[in-house]
Image: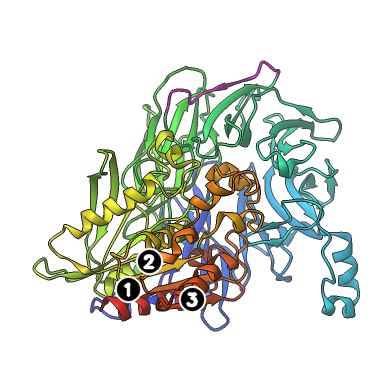
């Protein structure tokens, strides 16, 4: 599981360390709280593939053992209600198709339960362990027909007939015509029964505690892709039949779960359509009717994950969990660069949230035992990607006797790290802002250092107390790296997140420049050698910066948004752009779209700028980066374009490892050329 440290001599972070990192995910504690199953991903340097297997930790002894083996991707492990069997999805035997497998805890061969043609997502055991419910999407009929004919299979798709706006998704490609539906699978025979059908998606199915009903979410508007916040919750008999809509309140809904007695449903959502900056809020609705109550009313806290990492990115499930007595509900939250686990009173209005797991770090996925006496979670910090932890719940509802069960990536013990300083500083208008400064290993306060300003994507995310390999890699080369959460970021209240809605590049730009001013005033910063980089929204801001100021001597603009006019309709967000950025269709207000577009000021650019973009980026289309590159070429500004074939928007976090390394090396090379 871990790699033996090769040498006792400390060494600095390197780009190809990405081959060495193993990444845990999806911790699932057994019903009796005695064991935890989790996944562990590794990279095969020879073929650039990533493989994932299951591991099991014994809570009392701390013993770890690899539970599945082989060059497969085993994912979504789940315990049967009696704790004797672990189910999981795996592509073993078929690289393109994952099936559901069962494996007894006491050993033996994994038994394939299904042989379905399509994609399986969320699934769950029935309370009696006899069935499983899942979210499944069949392959399109023409794709199945093409697979039967070798000639047609080699020729591939001859055309795409598109009728929806949600026809593509970053990282997944073009979407099939088939929709997600609810299926029930017999746990013994594997016989699969489809409960829902039609041209609407049904997602996130959950069993009622008595096993009689299944809860799911669905947007059943006439045009769901044009009405993105019209999600509702539905109940359907477990044996099939007519579905019934749960009485809630308008707005997006997700993550719904039954209370222990089955009388209520808790869910996360937003009740301001078209305002994605709103905190994710907690609601409770009675199954028998009467509407939903906002449990988090008056609590300015985002209930969800939003922190950026590039090795460990957090991991599901972020499922709501009811306490055993049905009085409280557990949820992850984002707050001031951390992600604690909190609980809220289900039926006591204006009750303050209880911080169950707190501290400087990120809870990345968590599960409870059946009695809700014990919780397992993954914990990421600034200096460690993630470890598996476990703890007991005390009488006050907080975690006690917590301990770490793993030593994943223990080869890092031989690394030489720079010190990280956490900073609160004032923006020009007096607003309190939050940032971090990473000094190079062996830092000498009497010297002057080149620096790199990092700007996060989103913008509705946060930098925080989570490991970033890229920052340590750049710092190891002798740079001071500094990053912050300007207005528009998540984790500091809804007012801060929504402050740039409809006006990107305003106060957020000021905040980023005030942070640069703060750094420039530090005695060890060489103001003549300051660089800037960022991706996605960070690429937007980097491009905006080079058009407004020449204070930075080099820039790297990654997966940029440069032009809101051409961005409209070219992104997989499509109409979601209105909800995220607060823009309108260009033909409705061309002036505002252009004013918020960094390309509008590119004529002023003089900063040498490397542009990095993925060729399969469906979030920020390749043409967004190409516009910047060509403009800088025409202006005579030093520029180069690095394109990453086959990669999606999230290349820095989950791309093929050799391409991630190439990105880092070109990033470094550009700053070495102009800052040193």
Task: Return the residue found at the far bottom.
Answer: 46
Q: Which residue is mark 1?
A: 13
Q: Which of labels 1 and 3 is toward the front?
A: 3
Q: Is residue 175 left or right of residue 462?
A: right
> Can see residue 129?
no
Which of the marked residues, 2 or 3, is nearer the chain's N terminus? 2
Q: CA distance from mark 1 to mark 2?
A: 8 Å
Which of the marked residues, 1 or 3, is nearer the chain's N terminus? 1
Q: What span is colored magenta in the figure? A: 288-299
The structure residue drawn at horizontal position 56% and vertical position 64%, both measured from the top left corner, is 624
Circle 1 packing at 10 Å, graded few (<14), some (14-19), many (20+), is many
Q: Secondary structure at mark 3?
A: helix
Q: Secondary structure at mark 2?
A: helix
Find residue 213 and report its horizontal and vertical position in percent.
75, 31
CB under 8 Å between callouts 1 and 2?
yes
Q: Which residue is mark 3?
A: 634
């Amino acid at each position: 599981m871990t790699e033996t440290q090769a040498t006792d001599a400390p060494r600095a972070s390197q780009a190809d360390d990405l081959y060495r990192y193993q990444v845990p995910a999806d911790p699932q504690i057994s019903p009796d709280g005695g064991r935890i199953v989790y996944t562990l991903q590794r990279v095969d340097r020879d073929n650039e593939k990533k493989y994932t297997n299951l591991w099991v930790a014994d809570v009392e002894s701390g013993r770890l053992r690899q539970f599945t083996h082989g060059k497969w991707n085993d994912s979504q492990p789940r315990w049967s209600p009696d704790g004797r069997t672990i189910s999981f999805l795996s592509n073993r035997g078929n690289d393109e198709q994952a099936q559901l497998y069962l494996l007894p805890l006491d050993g033996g061969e994994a038994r394939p339960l299904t042989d379905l043609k399509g994609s399986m997502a969320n699934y769950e055991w029935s309370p009696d362990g006899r069935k499983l419910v899942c979210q499944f999407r069949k392959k399109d009929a023409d794709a199945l027909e093409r697979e039967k004919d070798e000639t047609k299979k080699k020729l591939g798709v001859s055309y795409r007939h598109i009728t929806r706006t949600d026809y593509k998704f970053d990282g997944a490609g073009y979407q099939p015509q088939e929709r997600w539906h609810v299926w029930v699978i017999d746990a013994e025979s594997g016989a699969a029964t489809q409960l829902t059908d039609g041209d609407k998606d049904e997602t996130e199915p959950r069993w009622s505690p008595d096993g009689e009903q299944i809860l799911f979410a669905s947007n059943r508007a006439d045009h769901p892709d044009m009405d993105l916040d019209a999600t509702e919750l539905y109940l359907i008999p477990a044996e099939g039949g007519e579905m019934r809509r749960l009485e809630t309140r308008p707005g997006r809904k997700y993550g719904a779960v039954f209370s222990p007695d089955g009388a209520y449903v808790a869910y996360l959502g937003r009740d301001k359509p078209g305002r994605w900056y709103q905190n994710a809020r907690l609601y409770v609705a009675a199954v028998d009717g009467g509407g939903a109550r906002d449990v988090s009313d008056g609590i300015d806290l985002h209930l969800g994950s939003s922190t950026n990492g590039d090795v460990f990115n957090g991991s599901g499930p972020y499922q709501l969990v009811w306490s055993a007595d049905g009085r409280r509900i557990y949820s992850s939250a984002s707050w001031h660069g951390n992600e604690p686990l909190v609980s809220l009173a289900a039926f006591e209005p204006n009750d303050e949230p209880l911080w169950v797991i707190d501290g400087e770090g990120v809870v990345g996925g968590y599960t409870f035992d059946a009695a809700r006496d014990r919780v397992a979670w993954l914990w990421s910090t600034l200096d460690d990607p993630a470890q598996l932890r476990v703890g007991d719940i005390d009488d006050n509802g907080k975690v006690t006797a917590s301990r770490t069960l793993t030593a994943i990536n223990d080869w890092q013990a031989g690394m030489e790290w720079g010190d990280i300083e956490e900073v609160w500083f004032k923006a020009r208008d007096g607003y309190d802002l939050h940032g971090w400064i990473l000094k190079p290993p062996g830092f000498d306060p009497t010297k002057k250092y080149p620096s790199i300003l990092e700007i996060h994507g989103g913008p509705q995310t946060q930098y925080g107390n989570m490991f970033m390999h890229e920052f340590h890699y750049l710092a190891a080369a002798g740079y001071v790296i500094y990053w912050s959460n300007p207005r528009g970021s998540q984790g500091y209240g809804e007012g801060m997140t929504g402050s740039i809605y409809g006006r990107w590049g305003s106060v957020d730009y000021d905040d980023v420049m005030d942070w640069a001013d703060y750094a420039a005033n530090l005695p060890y910063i060489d103001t003549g050698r300051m660089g800037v980089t960022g991706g996605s929204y960070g690429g937007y801001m980097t491009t905006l910066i080079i058009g407004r100021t020449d204070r930075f001597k080099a820039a790297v603009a990654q997966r940029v948004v440069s032009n809101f006019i051409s961005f409209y309709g070219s992104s997989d967000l499509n109409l979601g752009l209105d909800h995220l950025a607060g823009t309108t269709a260009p033909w409705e207000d061309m002036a505002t779209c252009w004013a918020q577009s960094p390309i509008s000021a590119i004529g002023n650019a003089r900063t040498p700028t490397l542009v990095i973009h993925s060729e399969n980026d469906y979030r920020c289309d390749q043409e967004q980066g190409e516009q910047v590159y060509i403009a800088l070429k025409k202006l005579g500004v030093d520029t180069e374009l690095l394109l990453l074939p086959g990669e999606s928007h999230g290349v820095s976090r989950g791309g093929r490892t050799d391409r991630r390394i190439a990105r880092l090396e070109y990033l470094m090379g550009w700053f070495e050329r102009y800052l040193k």
